[in-house]
Image (cartoon, rainbow, N blue to C red):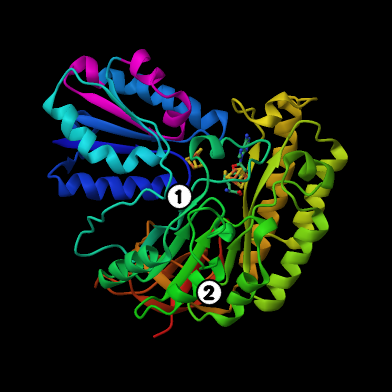
C-alpha cells in the first residue's frame, strides 16, 4: 500500500521515522509521492512545547479531507503527543486507527498488518517497555552518508519544564554490543558519519539496564570502527559531562569538534527552579575545559526565555553567558506550560509580550555571534562531507552542499557533473552567509 510518514520534533523522532519507513518498505509498502495518493498516514508527533502539539491537530484536520474523499484512508498517530493523549485520538478522530508511543514503535509494522486484515479494528500501543525496545534492522543496500544511531531511550532527569520523561519514559540504555553492530552495518552500506542519539547521552549506562560500558568507552569503541570518518552525539546534559568525555575530543580520531550543550538559562535562580543541577559557574567551567581539550570546538545550545519567575536580571544573566561563551548557534524557545510538569504550577508566569521581547533580543544577539563565528572561518581549511547538490546553482558553476567538521552547512563550488555525495573534500572557506559558509574545493 502507499503511505506517508509526517514527522515533528527532535532527531529521535526523525530517526524513529527513518526506521519505520525502512520496516514498512521491507513489508512491501511504498512511500506515496503525493498526499492524495496515500492509503495510510503515520504522524510522528512532538509534545515538547505547545506549538508542535497544536500542529498535530491542524495536520489531522487536513488529513480528515483525505478520509472524507476516501473512507478507506486511515491515520496512525505516534510519538510523544500520542503517548501523552493516548486513546483520546481514537475516540476523537474516526479515521485514526492506531496510536503508539515511542516504546510501541517497534510493534507498528505488525499492528499495521492487523489493521489491514481487519478493517473495523483500532489499536493502541502505549505501554512502556522495561528494557530498551530492540528493533530488527531493514536497511537498504546503500544509504546516505550520514546516519543516526539510538543509544538509549527515555530520560530520568525530570527538568521542571519538560514533558519528555513522561512521553519517552525512564532512561533505558541499549546494549553496547548492539549499538556497535548497528554502526558496523551502517558503515558497510556507505555511511561515513554517525550521530549517536539520546535525550541525555552522558548518562549512558547509568540505569538499571546497563552493562559496564560508560559513554566515553562507547565513544572509543565506535570511533575505532574501520570505515567510519565522523562521529557525533546529541544531546548532552551539562551535569553529566564527565572529564573522560571532554578528553575524548582530544584523544579520539573521528569524533568531530562540535558539541550541543543545552544551557537553558544563565541565571542560577532559574537553573535551580528548573532542576538542572548545575549553575552558571559550573557551565562556564565546562566550556573552558572543552576549549582546552579542543580549542576549535563548535559550541551550540538550547535556550529558553520566560520560565516562571524569570526577572529582567535573570534574563541578563542568560545574555551574559551567551557573550562569555559565544555560541556558534542556538535553538531558543519561549517557555510554555506542559501538562503535568512541575513548572506548570510555578508562579509568576511571564506575559507573552515579555517572552516575545526577550526572545527577540536573544535571537538578535545570537545572529551577531553566528555571523562573527562564521566570518572567523574565512580563509581557513576544513574537510567537508558532501550530502548532495546545493540549492544554489549558477551558470557554468556547480555547487555542492555538505557540512564541515563542526557541523556547519557549507556550499562548495566544485565544477563536476559526477555525483559527489558521500565524498569528503578539502575546502577553503571564502564567504560567510547568515547561517552557512561558502567554500572552494581544493583539489
Ligand atoms: N534532552 C535535551 C532536550 C530535550 S527537549 C536536553 O536535556 O537538553 C529540547 C529543548 O526544548 C530543550 O532543551 C528546551 O530548551 C526546550 N523545551 C523543553 N521543554 C520546554 C517547554 N516546556 N517550553 C519551552 N521549551 C521547552
Ligand atoms: Fe527534558 Fe531535562 Fe530530560 Fe532533557 S534532560 S529530556 S530537558 S527532562
Ligand atoms: Fe518532542 Fe518527544 Fe523529541 S516531545 S523533542 S519528539 S522526545
When asked about the image quadrant of residue 181, the answer is bottom left
Image x and y of residue 279, in percent: 80, 53
Give neighbour class at mark 2: few <14, some 14-19, many 20+ (Cα, 10 Å).
many
The residue nearer to you, when weighing 403 against 127, is 127
Q: Is residue 357 left or right of 99 when viewed as pictured?
A: right
Q: Residue at x 30, y 18 (%)?
A: 64
**Residue span colored magenta:** 66-93
Q: Secondary structure at mark 1?
A: helix
Quadrant containing the N terminus is: top left
When asked about the image quadrant of residue 166, the answer is top right
Above or below, 296 relative to 287:
below
Contact between labelled residues 2 and 1, with CB atoms less than 8 Å apart: no
Q: Secondary structure at mark 2?
A: strand
In the picture of the structure, the residue carrying the numbered disc 1 is 11
Q: Is mark 1 within 8 Å of ligand 3?
A: yes
Above or below, 207 relative to 97:
below
Q: In which of the image's four quarters is ligand 1 placed?
A: top right
Amino acid at each position: 500500500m502507499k503511505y506517508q510518514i509526517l514527522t515533528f520534533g527532535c532527531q529521535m523522532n526523525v530517526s524513529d521515522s527513518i526506521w519505520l519507513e525502512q520496516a514498512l518498505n521491507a513489508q512491501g509498502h511504498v512511500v506515496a509521492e503525493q498526499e492524495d495518493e496515500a492509503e495510510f498516514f503515520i504522524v510522528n508527533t512532538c509534545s515538547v512545547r505547545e506549538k508542535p502539539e497544536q500542529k498535530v491537530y491542524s495536520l489531522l484536520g487536513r488529513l480528515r479531507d483525505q478520509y472524507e474523499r476516501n473512507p478507506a484512508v486511515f491515520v496512525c498517530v505516534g510519538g510523544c503527543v500520542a503517548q501523552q493523549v493516548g486513546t483520546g485520538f481514537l475516540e476523537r478522530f474516526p479515521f485514526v486507527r492506531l496510536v503508539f508511543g515511542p516504546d510501541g514503535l517497534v510493534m507498528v509494522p505488525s499492528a499495521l498488518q492487523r489493521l489491514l486484515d481487519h478493517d473495523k479494528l483500532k489499536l493502541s500501543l502505549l505501554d512502556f517497555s522495561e528494557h530498551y525496545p530492540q528493533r530488527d534492522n531493514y536497511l537498504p543496500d546503500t544509504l546516505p552518508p550520514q546516519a543516526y544511531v539510538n543509544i538509549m531511550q527515555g530520560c530520568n532527569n525530570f527538568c521542571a519544564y519538560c514533558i519528555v520523561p513522561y512521553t519517552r519514559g525512564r532512561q533505558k540504555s541499549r546494549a553496547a554490543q548492539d549499538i556497535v553492530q548497528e554502526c558496523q552495518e551502517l558503515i558497510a552500506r556507505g555511511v561515513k558519519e554517525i550521530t549517536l542519539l539520546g535525550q541525555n547521552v552522558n548518562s549512558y549506562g547509568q540505569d538499571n539496564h546497563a552493562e559496564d560500558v560508560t559513554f566515553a568507552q562507547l565513544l572509543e569503541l565506535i570511533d575505532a570502527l574501520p570505515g567510519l570518518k565522523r562521529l557525533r552525539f546529541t544531546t548532552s546534559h551539562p551535569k553529566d559531562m564527565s572529564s573522560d568525555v571532554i578528553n575524548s575530543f582530544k584523544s579520539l580520531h573521528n569524533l568531530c569538534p562540535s558539541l550541543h550543550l543545552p544551557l537553558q538559562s544563565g541565571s542560577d535562580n532559574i537553573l535551580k527552579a528548573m532542576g538542572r543541577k548545575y549553575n552558571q559557574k559550573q557551565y562556564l567551567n565546562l566550556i573552558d575545559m572543552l576549549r582546552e581539550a579542543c580549542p576549535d570546538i563548535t559550541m551550540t545550545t538550547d535556550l529558553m526565555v520566560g520560565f516562571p519567575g524569570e526577572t529582567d536580571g535573570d534574563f541578563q544573566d542568560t545574555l551574559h553567558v551567551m557573550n562569555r561563551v559565544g555560541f556558534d548557534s542556538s535553538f531558543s524557545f519561549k517557555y510554555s506550560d506542559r501538562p503535568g510538569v512541575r513548572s506548570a504550577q510555578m508562579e509568576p508566569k511571564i506575559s507573552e509580550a515579555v517572552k516575545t521581547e526577550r526572545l527577540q533580543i536573544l535571537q538578535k544577539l545570537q545572529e551577531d555571534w553566528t555571523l562573527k563565528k562564521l566570518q572567523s572561518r574565512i580563509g581557513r581549511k576544513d574537510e567537508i562531507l558532501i550530502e548532495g547538490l546545493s540549492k544554489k546553482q549558477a551558470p557554468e558553476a556547480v555547487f555542492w552542499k555538505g557540512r564541515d567538521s563542526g557541523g556547519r552547512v557549507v556550499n562548495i563550488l566544485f565544477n563536476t557533473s559526477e555525483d559527489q555525495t558521500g565524498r569528503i573534500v578539502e575546502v577553503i572557506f571564502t564567504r560567510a552567509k547568515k547561517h552557512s559558509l561558502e567554500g572552494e574545493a581544493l583539489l
